[in-house]
Amino acid sequence: MTDSTAVTWEAPDTDHPARRAARSSMAAVTAGHRGEWLGLFAPDALVEDPVGPSPLDPEGRGHRGHDEIGRFWDAYVGSVREYRFHVKDSFANGPCCANVASIVMTLDGGATMTVDCVIIYTVDESGAITSLRAHWEPDRAMATLTAP
């Protein structure tokens, strides 16, 4: 379940379709609502989290379509006990919004990890997310891992 501190927003917040999608995505993640999160994506959307090869995506090709994105949720997103998003800046233009953020994740057992990142959301004319590209470095995130 989410609370009022699950997402803090210290960035510009003018209305923009991609910014709305980004906020909806964070709300669904913090609430643990898989179906709601998947419903934000266009049928052929691409999720790259992080962009490029990583332990989460060794080939670096991303996760395309609801089935692959759903498996990504099951393996990674849904395995985190609690998320706290802190959006420090946000740039919205064209069909995109780029958010500069820190995400603190509490894992089962109580360990925490912080991911400092830039997340770029792109939406179509209907506001559905066509791509979510999260730029972060796994080694930097792992260096923040704390014991419970």
Image (cartoon, rainbow, N blue to C red):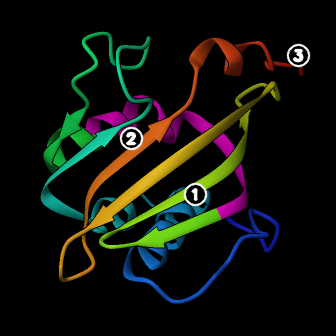
Residue in the picture at 44% in, 29% down: 50
Front residue of this view, candidates 88 and 126: 88
Q: Which residues are magenta?
A: 71-89
Query: Where, by quadrant of the figure, is residue 106 drawn?
Result: top right
The location of residue 34, given as percent across then percent down, is 39, 56
Q: Is residue 64 left or right of residue 50?
A: left
Q: Which residue is disc 2 drawn over?
A: 73
Q: Quadrant of the N terminus?
A: bottom right
Q: Which residue is disc 3 drawn over?
A: 147
The location of residue 72, given as percent across then percent down, is 34, 35
Q: Which residue is disc 1 drawn over?
A: 99
On whether residue 76 falls in the magenta region, the answer is yes
Q: Quadrant of the C terminus?
A: top right
Query: Where, by quadrant of the figure, is residue 124 drawn?
Result: bottom left
Q: Is residue 72 left or right of residue 146?
A: left
Residue in the picture at 82% in, 29% down: 110
Amino acid under disc 2: Trp
On screen, residue 51 above or below 144: below
Front residue of this view, candidates 57 and 92: 92
How far, Cα to Cα, is label 1 from label 3?
A: 28 Å
The location of residue 42, given as percent across then percent down, is 17, 63
On whether residue 88 falls in the magenta region, the answer is yes
Q: Is residue 107 left or right of residue 30?
A: right
Q: Residue furthest toward the bottom?
A: 15
